[in-house]
Amino acid sequence: MQVFVWVWMYLLFVLEAAAVALLWRCTCRFPAAEMFFGRLARHKAAPLTVGLLAMALRLAVLPIEPVPTPTIHDEFSYLLAADTFVHGRLANATHPLWQHFETMQVEHQPTYASMYPPLPGLVLAAGLVLTGIAFAGVWLAIGAMCAAICWALRGWFSPGWAFLGGSLAAVRLGMFSYWADSYWGGALTATGGALVFGALPRLVRNSRPRDAFLGAVGIVMLANTRPYEGLAFTLAVALAAIPRLRRVRFRTILPPALVVLLAAGAWMAYYNWRVYGSPLTLPYTVNRATYAVAGAYVFQAPSPEPHYRHPSLRDFFVGWEVPYFVRSRTPVGYLGTLGLKLSRLWLFFVGPVLTLPLFAVLWTWRSRRTRAFLTMAAVVAAAAALVPWFMPHYAAAATALIWALLIQGMRVLRHWRPAIVRSIPVICVVMVAVRAGMALSPIPFVLTYNMTWATTWSEPLGRERIVERLHSYGGRHLVIVHYQPGHDPLKEYVFNGADIDGSEIVWARDMGAERNQELLRYFRSRKAWLLEAGPQPPELRPYPARNRAGLGSDTK
């Protein structure tokens, strides 16, 4: 089965490479379409048009790529944050039986809350408030991202090239990628990065307060989505701006930027105080200090192993994270990690169709614009090289920069072989049709593995089927999850909403027959169930009689 997974994962890229080869000498032209889109690109509302296009495209593929079901730890954590905000709170009080509800990426001390920065949760909460569906927040974020990319590119290139770049982002990132098909995020960080990236050339040319305001908003977005990578990208843009500082009118741009940054800083300090107990305690830090052994950076030594109340938590933080972390600290392992990061970047952002424009950038290295881009890319790459973990959304802050490099390469190709540039959007559209055809095909293509422009990564849980089954019974339920030996720690069932006691279904960890009695007494009005989770599909059955002593904890 694993062989077929890899075959399907790369089939799209083989087909895309074949399309590039076929259209290499294509001489077709589309004068009417080019004239129409040229006029549209020059309109001041072009970025908004690109954003609406991205949202329309995502809606168009809903029949084959429906509203996603959360499966990964991070997704449940973001959804907890959204539910908390919808309840009008920044954090929730710690539950008296919180030890039964401990889980990955979630705080229970000093409050019950997501471990992540607040912006993704706020946007998902907006989707819940506006439509009743958290995914509406993802949909809005995709539109904002593509609009911001188009706006950013207009600061560096002509309107036509910027419109092309934003439209390609809508097709390649806004339809089938996990940024548009999960709750992991990526789009919000990319939006913040695009605002910072697009503000630089505008501030150098005109130093308008509006652009300073937007750039500061971008910095705030980065700080509240991916703080480390956001800081690295902000520093990268600042470094590239140094040769141009003499042209910036600081008296004009500092007041609006400082207002945004100071107001956001005060709110972030208040949020950290309410959620983590101190205005200087940042997201991530409490959770990692409580549970993690692996360090955040490759130069850190592993921390002492903490006491885990649940072996399934140890399986994740020690059994899954530590071997990867330790391997990344060896010379061979570190090189392998760098190779994995590059391959994931290529699979997600580039692919065969955009590889040639990326290499063509090298022919423009003498350009001041290209040197600025490469300076930023070098700083971002250096920051990414210090961490052992990597997913494409870790590089989301640099999305507009990556697209700028691709557009710069296309400008070179236009003078060398114009047909290649014309064929790129055609190939992208054709590949979307191929991807849609694979989803509709009776052949069971595996499209939920790894993270490319056309696939996501998920760990099918069957949790939603359990929820539907319990809903059909009516009433309120308590599900006690017992993890069997060999259980995959990435497949986690114990996640709850902001109001645990008010939830229709409460998920809890098995802590042994004796400790489980406190759960059963506290939730005595609920129907109790036992979920056996292991290598095999999960099995739900009524919880055994209360005096049954044979049930143990989720030990191995």
Image: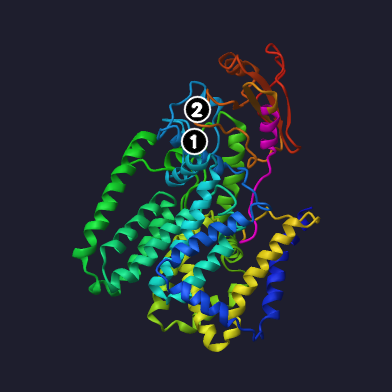
Residue in view at x 50 percent, y 59 percent: 52
Q: Is residue 333 above or below residue 138?
A: below
Q: Is residue 432 above or below residue 78?
A: below
What's the magenta region?
A: 453-471
- x then y, percent, for residue 15: 72, 70
Q: Is residue 109 left or right of residue 73?
A: left
Q: 10 Å neighbourhood of mark 2: few (<14), some, or many (≥20)?
A: some
Along the line of sight, the residue nearer the viewer: 288 or 217: 217
* Residue at image mark 1: 83
* Residue at image mark 2: 499
Q: Which residue occupies the extreme left position in the image?
A: 251
* Type of amino acid under label 2: Asp
- x then y, percent, for residue 40: 47, 72
Residue in view at x 51 percent, y 37 percent: 80
Q: Is residue 389 above or below residue 38?
A: above
Along the line of sight, the residue nearer the viewer: 239 or 386: 239
Q: Quadrant of residue 14?
A: bottom right
Residue in view at x 64 percent, y 73 percent: 427
Q: Is residue 503 magenta?
A: no
Along the line of sight, the residue nearer the viewer: 343 or 449: 449
* Badge 2 element: loop
Q: Is residue 211 above or below residue 118?
A: below
Labels 2 and 1 touching (C-beta < 8 A) = yes
Q: Is residue 306 left or right of residue 508?
A: left
